């Protein structure tokens, strides 16, 4: 039987979430603040968005913002920003003739090498190969609404990029942090 306070404060579903360590966000005011920060990231994803700046936009502490954002949207703020930048880069690769360097800097990357590495890690293709692939498939996608194409091409960042790299390399890539048993 779930704890009495969980049943009183949110029913059996809240008790299950609490037991799993992921209480749902129930505060509409906090959700509005988080959405405000996410909207700001969407509008200016080419800018640097450290957690402190996002927390300031939301009017909460940095630690509280980071925890709440992940609970609300399922991924940390940094991964959300990476997703938006990769989506925009893919769109620019498909729809423009800008050079890959121009696309990297336009979408907020400070280093062409980092852009290429992260892009490849997330999409499985280099930016040049992705451009060739999406431009070759353009005639097949003419009848599909743009929002559907964008959703289908959205990168999956439910796991960290380094973890993805380790899995592909068969655990040959060392973790960036020391794991404690």
Image (tube, grey):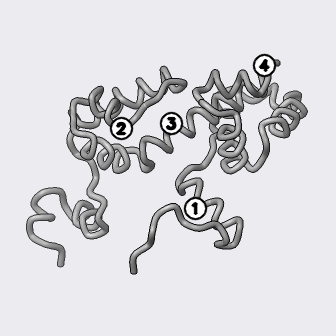
* Element class at badge 2: helix
Q: Which residue is mark 4?
A: 98
Q: Nearer the viewer, mark 2 or mark 3?
A: 2
The Cα–Cα distance between marks 1 and 4, rounded to whole angstroms, is 31 Å
Measuring from the top left, give residue 46's x and y in whole percent: 54, 24
Residue depicted at 75% across the width and 50% down the height: 124
Q: Which residue is mark 2?
A: 51
* Element class at badge 4: loop
Q: Which mark is residue 81?
A: 3
Measuring from the top left, give residue 95's x and y in whole percent: 77, 21
Q: Which mark is residue 163?
A: 1
Task: Give whichever of 50, 9 is nearer the camera.
Answer: 50
- The quarter of the picture where residue 130 lies is top right
The Cα–Cα distance between marks 2 and 3, rounded to whole angstroms, is 11 Å
Residue depicted at 26% across the width and 46% down the height: 63
Report crowding for label 1: few under 14, some 14 to 19, many 20 or more residues within 10 A (C-alpha).
some
The Cα–Cα distance between marks 3 and 4, rounded to whole angstroms, is 22 Å
């Amino acid at each position: 039987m779930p704890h009495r306070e969980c049943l009183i404060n949110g029913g059996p579903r809240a008790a299950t979430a609490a037991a799993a360590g992921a209480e749902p966000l129930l505060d509409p005011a906090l959700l509005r603040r988080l959405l405000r920060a996410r909207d700001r990231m969407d509008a200016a994803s080419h800018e640097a968005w450290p957690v402190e700046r996002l927390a300031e936009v939301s009017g909460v502490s940095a630690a509280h913002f980071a925890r709440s954002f992940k609970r609300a949207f399922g991924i940390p703020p940094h991964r959300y920003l990476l997703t938006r930048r990769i989506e925009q880069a893919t769109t620019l690769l498909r729809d423009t003739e800008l050079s890959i360097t121009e696309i990297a800097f336009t979408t907020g990357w400070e280093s062409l090498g980092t852009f290429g590495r992260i892009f490849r890690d997330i999409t499985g293709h280099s930016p040049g190969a992705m451009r060739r692939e999406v431009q070759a498939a353009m005639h097949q996608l003419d009848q599909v609404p743009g929002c559907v194409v964008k959703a289908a091409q959205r990168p999956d960042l439910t796991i960290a990029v380094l973890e993805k790299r380790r899995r592909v390399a068969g655990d040959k890539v060392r973790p960036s942090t020391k794991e404690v048993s």
